[in-house]
Structures are given as structure tokens and as C-alpha cells.
Image (tube, helix red, strand yellow):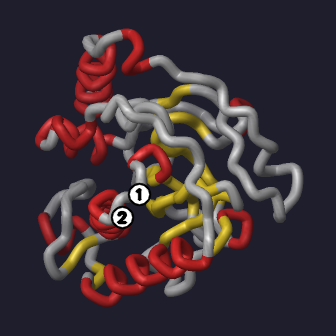
Amino acid sequence: MKHFIVASAFLMFIASLPADATNIHPINLKPQFETQKVAFLQSYGDTLPPIGYVNFCREREIECRPSGRFADRVQLNSAKFEELKQVNSSVNKAVAPITDIDLYGEVEVWTYPINEGDCEDYVLLKRRILIEKGWPESALLITVVRDENNEGHAVLTVRTDGGDFVLDNKQRNVKAWADTPYTFVKQQSARNPLVWISLLPPSLAPQVSVSASSLL
């Protein structure tokens, strides 16, 4: 019930924004289930955000508001790819993995890590660093997945003209999304960081929770 109330308040917050700030434009990409080598993820409409993200935005509202600037996919070249690799590697080395329960005594806390953090914290830090380096925030999407053990996990998806790539605290290398062992569940909208979109076909996406840990 608590999660439902928080999620409802978050959706009311979105509704209070100007209409053009929350407008979602269809993304015409190939389905992720068509082949393991498809470059781009397919979206399947709006879904609820993870509860940790809801709370993060309540505390850091300015960081979650749409910038008003939408950039198309980043043109990927060797220099850009090296930058992604460097950021992924440096953050993975600088932050020691720890669960929110062990660090904060709570199940779900999203924040910027200092020396320790869990998967969402790595994602937030990598995203902020890349934005500071000039990458458009619309190309840097927080993404919830099921990992190889069918457990909740978060990665940073980078939208490029060469495909969707993943920055992951479990992996040193930057990989195309289809080369990971993950099932992609949901991510931020490229046009509005407040809005989340499903990456699962409706038949595979039962809506029973808003926690990233339980992965809907």
C-alpha cells in the first residue's frame, strides 16, 4: 500500500508538468525478441517507475525534470566508445559493491555513491559523469533488467546510432544490449526522465509492484 501511495503521488507530480513535457512519442524500433543481434530495444508503452527512483526524485526533483532538449541517438565513433569504456571502468573500480540493506538498513535506496553502493548507485554516477562530459541525458537511460539469476538489477543504457549499449557494474566491458545475459524490463523514456516505459511485451509484464528489486 505504501508503494502504491508513493507511486500515485509520483504520477500526480508528472501530471502537473506542462503537456509537452510529458508527451511520449512512439519509438519505432525492432523487437528485442526477434533476434539476439538486434541493435535497438523495443518499447511497449508506459509503466510504473521503480520505487527507489520515485524516492530519489522526491529528494532531487531538479535532476529528474525534463531538460526540454531532446537529442537523437548519439553518433558513435571510436572516441565516444572509449569514453564509455573509461567511465564504466573507472566507476566500477572506484565503488565497492554493497547492498542497500547492509549500507542503509533499507531495501531500496537510490543515491550517488561515495565509496560503496549497489547497482542503481553505479548507474546514477555513470549517468551524471557522462552528462558532465557533454553526453545528452536523453541518450543515457536508467534501465531495470532481470539478471542471469532472474534477480533485479539496474544498468545504464546508452542510445547510439550503432545500437543500444550497456554500462554495467558487473561487467568491465561495454556491451551491446543483446550481448548481455539479461532480460530487459523497463527504462526511462528518452524524451522525459520522469516517465518510464516497458521493454517487455504486455503478455510478459504483469504489474504487481513498483520495486526494482522485485522487478514488477
Q: Is 71 left or right of 113, judged from the image as shown? A: right
Q: How packed is label 2: few (under 14 Cα within 10 Å), some, or many (20 or more)?
A: some
Look at the numbered disc 2 and give the secondary structure of its residue: helix
Q: Quadrant of residue 169?
A: bottom left
Q: How packed is label 1: few (under 14 Cα within 10 Å), some, or many (20 or more)?
A: some
Above or below, 16 relative to 77: above
Q: Is 46 left or right of 10, judged from the image as shown? A: right
Look at the numbered disc 1 and give the secondary structure of its residue: loop
Which label's residue is closer to the chain start, 2 or 1?
2
Q: Is residue 216 at least partly visible in the picture? A: no
Tell me what residue is drawn at x 60 percent, y 78 percent: 78
State yes or no: discs 2 and 1 in contact (Cβ < 8 Å).
Answer: yes
Amino acid of disc 1: Trp
Which one is nearer the viewer's eye here, 199 or 28? 28
Tell me what residue is drawn at x 46 percent, y 35 percent: 70
Circle 2 sits on which residue? 130
Residue 191 place in picture, x, y as percent:
47, 32
Quadrant including the N terminus: top left
Which one is nearer the viewer's eye here, 146 or 163? 163
Amino acid of disc 2: Leu
Q: Quadrant of residue 3?
A: top left
Residue 171 place in picture, x, y as percent:
52, 82
Residue 149 place in picture, x, y as percent:
59, 71
Q: Is 31 left or right of 61, judged from the image as shown? A: right
Circle 1 sits on which residue? 135
Tell me what residue is drawn at x 19 percent, y 73 percent: 102
Q: Quadrant of residue 126?
A: bottom left
Which one is nearer the viewer's eye here, 52 or 58? 58
Q: Is 164 left or right of 31, judged from the image as shown? A: left
